[in-house]
Image (tube, rainbow, N blue to C red):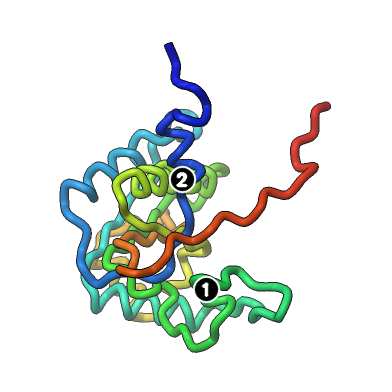
Amino acid sequence: GRRSFKTNEVMQTIFHRRSIRRFDTRQIEEETLQQILQAGLYAPSAGGRQGVLFAVSQNREVNERLGKIKRANSHPRMATATSYVSREQPSIADDPKLVNAFYDAPTVITMFAPKDFLFSVDDCAVAAENMMLAADALGVGSCYIGQGWTAFADSYGQEILKQWGIRTDYYAVMQLLLGYPRPGDAHPQAKPRKNDRVLRV
């Protein structure tokens, strides 16, 4: 029979997963990366179209430069004493001193989807969630970064799109950062779940 809710491994992974924004320098293993990508490839897609492209970059120089371009084109409201993304692992919205929007992650997966398809963002989001859960189950940290197109918003970024062979009718929806958490970092704690979010109608 099915295991109970509390001992089910999928549920345990869902409860354990957190956004990781501080990464060890070592690269994730190829076999581990392939398993995470398989989770993305098997995600739901609208109409079963499988329209999402996964551009995997493990080039430190390219990732750093694109991350800096993205940071320069992102203008999130900086944190206040009461409004912030994370105290444990600050985000670019919290800390103006962070200059790389990819937080020096060793693997950056940019997910591209058709510009003219109604559900492109949704398809990328569900694929990313599959991959984040797979990553957590494999001991890899991950972080979802929205507004992926801002990383390519200059001539260098446009040249990279050509080098990668990205179709001009596709756009960068988001980036998924992957890497091992830094040794010694505590796993981020879950915030208490807010009440009254489930409406029994």
Count numbered badges in the picture.
Answer: 2
Residue 168 seen from this side:
no
Residue 11 screen position, x and y as percent = 48, 34
Residue drawn 80% across and 42% down? 196
Q: Are marks 2 and 1 in contact (CB under 8 Å)?
A: no
Horizontal side of 85 relative to 125 (left or right) equals: right
Residue at the image point whose x is 54% and y is 86% from the top: 96
Q: Which label belongs to residue 129?
A: 2
Query: In this orientation, does residue 63 appear?
Result: yes
Dot 2 amino acid type: Glu
What residue is shown at x 30% (from left), y 61% (from top)?
A: 180
Position of the N terminus by quadrant:
top left
The residue type indicated by label 1 comes to Ser
Q: Position of residue 7 (x, y in %)?
A: 45, 29
Instruction: Locate residue 11 relative to residue 56 in the image: left or right.
Output: right
**Label 1 SS:** loop
Provide the residue designation for mark 1. Answer: 91
Is residue 153 or residue 68 the one in the foreground?
68
Q: What residue is at 33 percent from the left and 74 percent from the top?
A: 104
**Furthest residue to the right?**
201
